[in-house]
Image: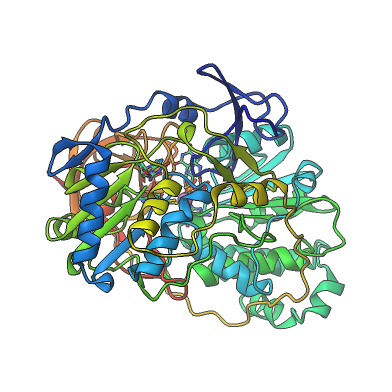
Amino acid sequence: MNSNNIACPLDCFDTCEASYNKGAVKPSLTHRVTNKKLCINFAKLLKEETFSSAFYENKNINLKQALEILRKKLEETKPSKTLYYKGSGNIGVFQSYPKTFFAKYGSTFTRGGLCDSIGSHALETSRGGANVNPSLEKLLSADVIICWGRNFSVTSSHMYNLVKDKTFITIDPISTPIAKKSQLYLQIKPKTDYELALLLTHYAKEYNLEDEAFIKEHKGKNFINLAQERSLESYEKTLGLPLSEIKKLMELIKGKSVALMLGLGAQKYYEGSSIFRVIDAFAACIGLHNPSRTAGGVWYLSDASYGYDKQLKTSKKKEVDITSVDYGAYDLLFIQGGDLLVSNPNSLKILNALKKTFVVYFGTCKNETSAYANLIIPAATFLQKKDVRLSYGHEEKVCSYKHEHDEEKISEYELSKYLFKAFDFEGLKDENEVFEYYKNAKAKAFILEKYNFIETLTIKNLYDEKKENEYYFITAKAKKSLNSQFSNENNVYLHPSSSFSAGQEVTLRSEFGEAKFIVCLSQDVREDCILCYAGNKHANYLTPARSDAFASSAIFQELLVHIDVS
Ligand SMILES: Nc1nc2c(c(=O)[nH]1)N[C@H]1C(S)=C(S)[C@@H](COP(=O)(O)OP(=O)(O)OC[C@H]3O[C@@H](n4cnc5c(=O)[nH]c(N)nc54)[C@H](O)[C@@H]3O)O[C@H]1N2
Ligand SMILES: Nc1nc2c(c(=O)[nH]1)N[C@H]1C(S)=C(S)[C@@H](COP(=O)(O)OP(=O)(O)OC[C@H]3O[C@@H](n4cnc5c(=O)[nH]c(N)nc54)[C@H](O)[C@@H]3O)O[C@H]1N2
Ligand SMILES: [Mo]
């Protein structure tokens, strides 16, 4: 890796590499996944308007004054009455530096997540503690790729590009671009994925797909019994998918090496962890976890730091669930790289809470949340600081060097250094040392020892509760935005058979809140679903401030929605 290198900081599977030369940024010619191309979101990031200065009560101040205000405020406030919040606007390793300060200082932290945590919890539970992807090589040598609740060609366009000529199968309520390119597309009813996975398990023996040795070694018989307890017809009835389609899937994967690409889709529910464990157990039954495989396997959002010795360790004192925390109950809220008013569930409640507390926003650019900040500390952009990007999509890391400098912006490391000094704390790890560690270290490989098949299930079906005039709520990523970044959406997507017309303003209402949206009609959406993209300003007015069953994490789709004419 040379010192012209830049890593894309955006929260995405691909973790691309670019090079910097006298102000010009070009895609890497050697990084395998980047493959000489950068995406539209990276281009937008390069052109983004960042904070012009620090701000205090909406007035320009200089960085030195801003840091002084932060120091004073932290001195005056009881540490446990401060909340440290880290979003995922940049997911470089060095973003965790401020965590090391706030943990020592004694702030309260958030527990759980908005993203992959429910699925990760599931995979860790089933696989003996770790959620790690197979090597990229095994994806490249697979014959068939199943995209299960993953918008593969949109949310990891570079990884997709490496395998785009393979046979695809897609399982998704929305007809995504990859669904349209697939040999087989199952437009599944939301939250019925565990039933589909059980049905596929039911068929595995008949198609000679069972990995009998693996099932025997890891005691999978009870899981298979669970799948066989129900009749084929009862699955067909609740899933609403013809058995002929299921048989077609089995035919397509029979005798082939299969890569199962799991995304967030099937896990955004209260019992999302159990749903995911059932899908993963089906994969186990057909041998996708067998360590002797040379091609295929199961991919998800892998634990990117697995196999490294964690350099920026913290010991947090107090944690509260990210889904239901009452931000207004804290005297100071420090937000780093997150747009809570757009990205977090039940966001109207958060808006009211932000008005009650002293909000510090530490980020690169304005967003909905920074508008409520009392103090804005402008973060150095990814070109203005050193960092290392590990990837949750594949095993290739990228080092990022500092290329530009702005006196009035500060990196996560420099801010932490300032605060460690101001509070006389010891133990801040040197930036170059951490950088060199990650640059040179090779991650230890994960070897599956014990697979724990899920054996019992209690799942409340949304279809048992749904009334005729209600819709399933789907919220997923858009091509031209990165979560809240670069997004300016206020649309709701409905099937053209609905009684609403394009451009019409409607009010969507759930048990948790309501907001107005503009109707867009799309054939890609199931008739019983509505879709709002991530980054939609008000989508999260509708979502629950509740955690899932195991991972203290957001359940963005555990709701049903009414549509009212505004
Ligand atoms: N362009 C772009 N790329 C991104 C991002 C972005 O915002 N924009 N965000 C990045 C981030 S932070 C993440 S976490 C990843 C996420 O990457 P993905 O997992 O691909 O993301 P999602 O779009 O949340 O969900 C995937 C799919 O699940 C489907 N789905 C919804 N409900 C269900 C269900 O009940 N069952 C099934 N089977 N499918 C369902 C949705 O229709 C959607 O197509 O993408 C990353 N990449
Ligand atoms: N309705 C709905 N809600 C969702 C989702 C969904 O699909 N639907 N997806 C969820 C998922 S998977 C995720 S990951 C979250 C993501 O949601 P967030 O954590 O809010 O992340 P972003 O929207 O990517 O970025 C937020 C901010 O990060 C700041 N930022 C960018 N770079 C830097 C930097 O280098 N340093 C600092 N300090 N700040 C920086 C920018 O100011 C930007 O406005 O949203 C979740 N919320
Ligand atoms: Mo995410």
Q: Is residue 391 above or below residue 560?
A: above
Q: Nearer the viewer, residue 530 or 81?
A: 81
Image quadrant holding the N terminus, namely top right
Q: 295 or 486: which is nearer to us?
A: 486
On the image, the x and y values in percent for residue 342 come to 29, 47
x and y, in percent, of residue 521 in the image: 33, 34
Front position in the image: 472 or 37: 37
Image quadrant where residue 262 sits: bottom right
Q: Nearer the viewer, residue 561 or 528?
A: 561
Query: In the picture shown, does residue 159 fall above or below 4?
Result: below
Residue 549 image-quadrant placement: bottom left
The reply, left or right, for residue 42 in relation to residue 62 is right
Q: Position of residue 221 (x, y in %)?
A: 75, 81
The C terminus appears in which quarter of the rendering? top left
Residue 99 in sight here? yes
Colour scheme in the image?
rainbow
Residue 123 lies, in percent from the top left, at 62, 67
Q: Is residue 438 left or right of residue 483?
A: right
* Residue occupying the point 40% across, 68% down: 104
Position of residue 45 in the picture relative to residue 184 (left or right): left
On the question of residue 563 being in view, the answer is no
Q: Is residue 464 above or below residue 26?
A: below
How many numbered tags mark residues here? 0
Q: Residue at x 50, y 18 (%)?
A: 23
